[in-house]
Image: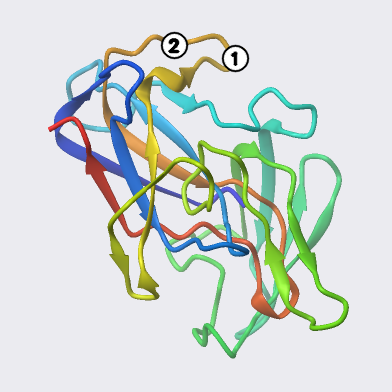
Amino acid sequence: FGGYIIVGFDHSIPNSGNQYDFCVQGNAFDGSSEPGIVWVMQDINGNGLPDDEWYELKGSEAGKEETIQNFEVTYYRPEGKKMDVQWISSDGRNGWVDYLSAYHTQDYYYPAWISENSYTLTGTCLAARNTQDSQTGYWDNQSYDWGYVDNFGNDQIEGGSTVDGSGQRNGFKISNAIHADGTEANLQYIDFIKIQCGVLAKSGWLGEVSTEVFSFEDLTK
């Protein structure tokens, strides 16, 4: 949960009204959704850096009781190589990011660029929708209706390809930008996009539910 990527454009993306203004490509398919929260920013101070105010793009789960804003998870450096990463969340839960050598064989899952022995990530957290079939053992990462990256929702746009096979793109509207209190932000354009992993969950032998992002596209051009 909480990991993110930030991208900037060499131009502003305008708010075209009630249309998809940009899309983000993931690799979701039916039964494999790993939702990412979308945040947008205007370069108000004009310095070309993402250091102004972030606005969340409202999705289908916004405002629901089980959706937690300003959720925090603190991760702790493991004592050695090829070990699980411990975490503690702001609502009192704790657990581990399992080391899965079948998929990722690097020595450490803890970020190499962080010198401290712990670090905290903050964002919006959706209620997990992953279940396991007791007969087959297969995990089903169920989708959300709309508004999230790497999600098999009803906001899919045709086209795209990924290293995993057929690509899957989700469309997003700048008009869905909201303030922290849920009111409309009424942004006329954006310059930066942030995708934040939006679920704190793991699906057994598949590992943690973690958003995957492949590309961004301006749909207004």
- The circle drawn on residue 185 is 2
Q: Which residue is mark 1?
A: 182
- Place of residue 25 in the rendered image (x, y in percent of width and height, measured from the top left): 35, 54
Residue 98 coordinates in the image, percent (x, y)? 70, 75
The residue at the point 50 percent across, 17 percent down is: 178
Q: Nearer the viewer, residue 142 or 35?
A: 142
The amino acid type of the residue labelled 1 equals: Gly
Are there few (<14), some (14-19), or many (20+) residues within 10 Å of tag 2? some
- On-image quarter of the C terminus: top left
Check residue 127 in the rendering and tell me which mark sits there, or answer none: none
- The picture places residue 54, in percent across and down from the top left corner, at 43, 25
Q: Is residue 107 left or right of residue 93?
A: left
As drawn, 220 above or below 80: above
Residue 27: quarter of image? bottom left
Q: Does dot 2 land on a helix, a strand or a loop?
A: loop
- Residue 88 vertical placement versus 86 (above, below): above
In the shown orientation, is residue 219 left or right of residue 86? Answer: left
Q: Secondary structure at mark 1?
A: loop
Q: Report which quarter residue 122 is drawn in.
A: top right
Q: Position of residue 77 (x, y in %)?
A: 64, 67
Three-letter amino acid code of the residue under disc 2: Ala
Where is residue 186, by image quadrant? top left
Given residues 110 and 181, the one toward you in this image is 181
Q: CA distance from mark 1 to mark 2?
A: 9 Å
Question: Is 63 in front, or is 219?
Answer: 219
- Mark 1 in CB contact with mark 2 (< 8 angstroms): no
